[in-house]
Amino acid sequence: MAVLGTVPEQLAAFELVGPALLWSETLSALREAVWRGALAEPDANAAVARLDTLGVARVSEPRLGAIAYELAGDLGWAKTYDAEYVALAKLLDAKLLTRDARLKRGAHRVVEFYEPG
């Protein structure tokens, strides 16, 4: 069982990275959850405080936007948000970890996905 604010044991051996968008999307999702009443403000504040303690490194890759834009077009996606994660995994030749089933269905031919056991 993972302790809040830590990476689950099965992921601890990996170098975890994400595009800068990861932080923006996480903060946006937390704010939306509070706004909808699905998450209490103190819980959201605690999650915001933990965000930078999880050991996920922000990767700034100059080509990421252009590659995500092209990938979104190739995959038939109207937006590039999800494509940034796919593009980063592709650039780093890394597996992508996501709980988003739609993203997996759409990008399974582009990158390999990590499936936690």
Image (tube, rainbow, N blue to C red):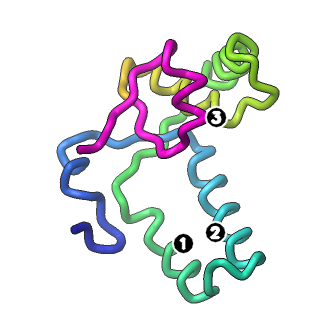
Viewer-nearest of labels 3 and 1?
Answer: 3
Query: Badge 2 is on which residue?
Result: 30
On the image, the x and y values in percent for residue 35 come to: 77, 77
**Three-letter amino acid code at disc 2?**
Leu
Residue 111 shown in magenta:
yes
Q: Tell me where residue 8 sits by quadrant.
A: bottom left
Q: Residue sitting at 66 percent across and 62 percent down? A: 29
Crowd class of label 1 (few under 14; some 14 to 19; many from 20; radius 10 Å)? some
Q: Residue sitting at 61 percent across and 30 percent down? A: 84
On the image, the x and y values in percent for residue 109 come to: 50, 13
Marks 1 and 2, Cα distance to the nearest angstrom? Answer: 8 Å
Q: Residue sitting at 35 percent across and 43 percent down? A: 16
Sequence-wise, the earlier of marks 1 and 2 is 2
Image position of 70 (left or right of 90): right
**Three-letter amino acid code at disc 1?**
Val
Query: Badge 3 is on which residue?
Result: 82
Disc 2 on helix, strand or loop?
Answer: helix
Marks 3 and 1, Cα distance to the nearest angstrom? Answer: 21 Å
Sequence-wise, the earlier of marks 3 and 2 is 2
Query: Badge 1 is on which residue?
Result: 48
On the image, the x and y values in percent for residue 67 come to: 64, 16
Q: Which mark is residue 116?
A: none
Q: Is residue 106 above or below residue 58?
A: above
Disc 1 on helix, strand or loop?
Answer: helix
Crowd class of label 2 (few under 14; some 14 to 19; many from 20; radius 10 Å)? many
